[in-house]
Image (cartoon, helix red, strand yellow):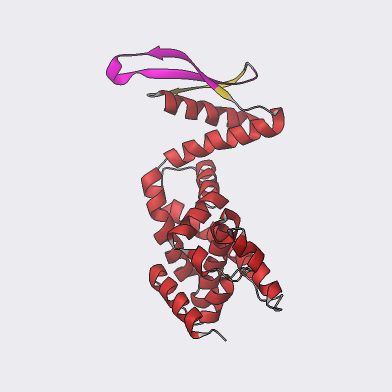
Amino acid sequence: MINMHRREQLRALEEDLGYLFDDAELLDLALIHKSYANEEGIPDQHNERLEFLGDSVLDLAVAGVLYELEPQLDEGDMTRVRAFLVKEDTLARAARALDLGGAILLGKGEQQSGGEDKSSILANAFEALVGAVYLDGGFGLAYNLVESIFAPVIDEGGTSVIARDYKTRLQEYCQARYKKAPTYRQVESTGPDHNRVFVVEVLVDKRCLERGRGHSKKEAEQNAARHALEILE
């Protein structure tokens, strides 16, 4: 049973979500961390199963939102943008915007260590929340929730989201394979001031991986990272 204080807390969250649960216990379960369940002697009553389900629902919903909002993206770009949108940091930011941290039930140890603001806990709770909406109202309503949260992120970031992900993924790849971060070096700049074209090399340990062109150094770096990833991956 959900006590009155908890019910009021959940109702405030529902208002922020713009979605009222038919089964409020699903929302409650989505916000129960395993540490709390273990301390309370209810080891099976935590959000990890909903998190697993929500992860799959979120992937599909974000793919659908991208398909509708970004028709110019090809399959590879959609994959990269989706990876950026559903990674832990992005999901944690979405959870913070909804103030999920204050509604997550945590064990005493997690509370004392600041668990309500840990990105991993927030991201997992957000996925569990998506899973709870899916079970309560179906995929259409879960999709609407995901769209309301991520469409503004996509609109604001546009294709720069892809570019940021290219550089991030190249850095992660190089750190894992070469134990070194890539560096960027401008090798050329042509054209009039109002329409200059920059050429940049991306290097690892003085070895050029690829070149990229762009109307700014930043764009050229992003394109160099993209070309390098196409070869390396």
Q: Residue at x 45, y 41 (%)?
A: 161
Image: magenta residue range = 184-205
Q: Indicate the position of residue 94 as horizontal and vertical percent values.
A: 47, 57
Q: Nearer the viewer, residue 87 or 39?
A: 39
Query: In the image as oriented, which residue stretches furthest toward the left?
Result: 194
Q: Is residue 63 visible?
A: no
**How many circles with numbers are drawn on the protein?**
0
Asked if residue 155 lies left or right of residue 225, the reply is: left
Q: Where, by quadrant of the figure, is residue 123 drawn?
A: bottom right
Which quarter shows the C terminus? top right
Q: What residue appears at the point 52 percent right and 55 percent down from the top-left corner?
A: 92
Up/down of 104 relative to 23, above or below: above
Comparing 77 with 146, the one in front is 146
Viewer can see residue 116:
yes
Residue 44 appears left or right of 123: right
24 sits to left or right of 216? right
| Residue drawn at x 63%, y 16% as measured from the top left | 206
Give the percent coordinates (x, y) of residue 6: 50, 79
Residue 7, compared with residue 232, is above or below; it is below
